[in-house]
Image (tube, rainbow, N blue to C red):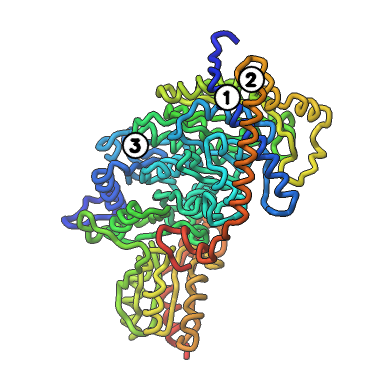
């Protein structure tokens, strides 16, 4: 691609740090669940590391994201602290949401994670509202609506893209097309690329290789800059692949073996790591040091979470309303 | 019905009261927004004109007409509220809330709790409904029980212009989502106007008529049916106490229990179908709290358990009428 905006060396390192964190966090999650120390519904984002790592490299702390149940990669890339995240995964009072939201409902306004939804397609209507608020305030904030290819066939997708285009909202719709909507292949549920639908609503719709840092960064940068400039929304369809089954414990027998093997062989995390070394941006020792720091931070977060107290039963009636109201 | 009749001095109607409440809130607080289908003045300020004049006065950026996209409407309201605004979203008719239930029930009602109190959703959802206009099965249901059954959303249903103003101002002030139900057929009924800035607290019932023999608990248009019933009962020597619930969730348990503790008889009247309705919850609570003190079993009157029919005689027979209320109250008082 010509005129592509490439991230500078520091930005590339920042992107890799996020990718490595997401990968390590995923591996740790699976390990801790398998060990029996933690029971939670877990929707692995492994394989999709590049997308939020590039997006967050183009965002400020003040920018908003909405994400979905398969969203720990989005949260980590945006900066949700590991201790708070893990304590929430473990249902502890020290978690982002005092243990009351859980893995599918992480909220952390301090890092701009405003909504995590467990309902397919529901990140988009709310992202529009956050973007409307930014438009009214003129504060230049951008909102990212993350969702999967399955959500592109839900009514809320169409209502949201239409409204965002008509109102020219500073929002970027990021469809992380991992080829699977739960157990069903994308090709079986749609005749057109998701990106093609952008045009239907009068916004740019672009399909990029979401596992290629340079393509993804370029697309994210352009869409976010366009939103920030008040020029309206963009739909990005970032092609990727879900390395695991829909939910932890799903044996993924429905996923084509050869396709999966090819995707695993093209794992974007080691691929980008090699690029950093080959391009002279970082040496092996630097990256190994970064990865060791991540592992240490995960050790700390997991132990912190599991040592934390569970919320008191009085939390059942708290936060239902601003003031406690008898049922 | 005096649709569009000029307002007498010091009087208002529900339609105008909601309009004035929105205008006063928009004028006082930049954070207040209004959005919904047809609500702008280019679209004549709503299908019956509830929002007329607001977009001209406050600008189309704050009073914003939307596509016919209920999920997008409620989603936009939720998102803007998370960022500090106080949106009032109109879902034109209550039956249309069905296509936005995910946004209302899974998100608006739950985000405060699921975020551990980090975020809240101070939105108002205005919606109109009610039988009487011959609109059939999909345009006039009372669905308040669905929302009252959801933790995290408040539900109000004013029966008078003053309450409509005061409850709307309180709903906009409220830090949590409030479903505000407006009865369409009684929009134009006139009575005392509320003074500017008036607030009716959410969660407080209003005793309209004091009595000793039976408590009639109703809300929304059923107050119009119950008011003459109370007069007819008085002529028959029965002293009925009429209580307007006003807020359905959270309902005013203290006021209802106090009234029934005095009269020992309770008749609950609502337009929504009877099974699993608001009346069932109140009847259960009263029976639990006052078992042994009641002179008669709690009685419920509600809509027939069928879709709202079109044909006029059927539609008239669908919801409780004054005569039904009189008969039920007499039966309760006759019960020994």
Q: Residues within 10 Å of mark 1 (few under 14, many from 20)?
A: some
Dots 1 and 3 on the same chain: no
Looking at the image, how many numbered discs can be counted on the residues? Answer: 3
Instruction: Describe the element under mark 3 as helix, strand or loop.
Output: loop
- Viewer-proximal residue, B245 or B271? B245
Q: Earlier in the sequence, mark 2 or mark 1?
A: 1
Q: Which residue is mark 2?
A: A276
- Viewer-proximal residue, B330 or B207? B207
Dots 2 and 1 on the same chain: yes
Q: Chain of mark 1?
A: A
Residue at screen point 30% across, 72% down: B208
Question: Residue A238, relative to residue B159: is it above or below?
Answer: above
Task: Give the quadrant of residue A323.
Answer: bottom left
Q: Chain of mark 3?
A: B
Q: Which residue is mark 1?
A: A13
Residue at screen point 72% across, 27% down: A267
Q: On the rendered structure, is B142 left or right of B40?
A: right
Task: Give the quadrant of residue A273.
Answer: top right
Residue A258 in the image: x percent, y percent?
A: 83, 28
Instruction: Describe the element under mark 2 as helix, strand or loop.
Output: helix
Numbered tag placed on residue B40 in the rendering:
3
Question: Residue B51, relative to residue A210: is it above or below?
Answer: below
Q: Residues within 10 Å of mark 3 (few under 14, many from 20)?
A: many
Viewer can see residue A194? no
Question: Residue B103, relative to residue B288: is it above or below?
Answer: above
């Amino acid at each position: 691609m010509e005129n592509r905006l490439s991230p500078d060396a520091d930005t590339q390192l920042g992107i890799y740090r996020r990718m490595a964190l997401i990968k390590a966090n995923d591996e740790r999650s699976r390990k801790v669940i398998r060990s029996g120390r933690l029971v939670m519904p877990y929707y692995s984002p492994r394989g999709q590391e590049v997308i939020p790592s590039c997006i967050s490299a183009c965002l400020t702390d003040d920018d908003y994201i909405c994400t979905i149940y398969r969203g720990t990669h989005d949260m980590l890339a945006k900066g949700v602290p590991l201790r708070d995240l893990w304590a929430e995964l473990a249902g502890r009072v020290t978690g982002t949401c005092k243990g009351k939201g859980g893995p599918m409902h992480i909220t952390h306004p301090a890092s701009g994670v405003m909504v995590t939804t467990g309902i397919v397609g529901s990140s988009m209507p709310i992202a529009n509202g956050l973007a409307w608020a930014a438009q009214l305030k003129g504060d230049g904030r951008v909102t990212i609506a993350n969702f999967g290819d399955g959500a592109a066939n839900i009514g809320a997708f169409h209502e949201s893209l239409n409204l965002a285009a008509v109102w020219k909202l500073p929002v970027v719709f990021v469809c992380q097309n991992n080829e699977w909507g739960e157990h069903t292949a994308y090709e079986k549920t749609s005749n057109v690329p998701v990106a093609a639908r952008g045009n239907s609503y009068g916004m740019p719709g672009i399909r990029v290789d979401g596992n290629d840092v340079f393509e993804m960064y370029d697309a994210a940068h352009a869409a976010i800059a366009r939103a920030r400039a008040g020029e309206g929304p963009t739909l990005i369809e970032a092609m990727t692949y879900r390395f695991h089954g829909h939910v932890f414990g799903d044996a993924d027998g429905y996923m084509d073996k050869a396709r999966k093997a090819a995707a695993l062989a093209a794992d974007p995390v080691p691929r980008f790591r090699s690029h950093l070394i080959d391009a002279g941006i970082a040496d092996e020792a630097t990256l190994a040091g970064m990865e060791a720091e991540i592992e240490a931070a995960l050790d700390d977060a997991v132990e912190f979470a599991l040592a934390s107290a569970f919320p008191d039963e009085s939390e059942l009636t708290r936060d239902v309303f601003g003031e406690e109201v008898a049922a | 019905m005096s649709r569009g009749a000029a307002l007498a001095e010091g009087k208002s109607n529900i339609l105008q009261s909601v309009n004035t409440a929105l205008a006063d809130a928009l004028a006082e607080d930049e954070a207040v927004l209004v959005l919904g289908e047809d609500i702008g003045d280019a679209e004549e300020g709503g299908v019956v004109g509830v929002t007329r004049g607001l977009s001209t006065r406050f600008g189309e950026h704050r009073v914003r007409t939307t596509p016919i996209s209920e999920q997008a409407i409620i989603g936009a309201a939720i998102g803007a509220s998370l960022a500090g605004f106080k949106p009032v979203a109109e879902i034109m008719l209550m039956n249309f809330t069905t296509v936005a239930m995910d946004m209302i029930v899974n998100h608006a009602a739950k985000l405060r709790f699921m975020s551990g109190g980090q975020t809240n959703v101070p939105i108002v959802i205005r919606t109109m409904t009610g039988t009487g206009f011959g609109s059939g099965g999909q345009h006039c249901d009372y669905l308040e029980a669905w929302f009252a059954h959801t933790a995290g959303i408040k539900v109000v249903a004013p029966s008078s212009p003053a309450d409509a103003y005061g409850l709307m101002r309180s709903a906009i002030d409220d830090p949590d989502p409030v479903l505000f139900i407006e009865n369409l057929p009684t929009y134009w009924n006139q009575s005392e106007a509320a003074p500017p800035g008036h607030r009716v607290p959410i969660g407080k019932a209003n005793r309209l008529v004091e009595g000793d023999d039976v408590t009639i608990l109703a809300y929304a248009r059923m107050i119009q049916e119950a008011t003459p019933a109370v007069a007819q009962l008085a002529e028959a020597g029965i002293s009925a106490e009429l209580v307007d619930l006003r807020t359905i969730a959270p309902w005013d348990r203290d006021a209802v229990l106090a009234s029934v503790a005095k009269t020992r008889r309770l008749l609950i009247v609502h337009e929504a179908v009877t099974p699993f309705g608001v009346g069932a919850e109140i009847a259960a609570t009263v029976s639990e709290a006052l078992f042994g003190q009641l002179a008669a079993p709690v009685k419920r009157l509600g809509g027939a358990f069928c879709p709202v029919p079109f044909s006029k005689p059927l539609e008239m027979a669908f919801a409780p009428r004054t005569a039904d209320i009189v008969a039920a109250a007499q039966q309760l008082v006759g019960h020994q």
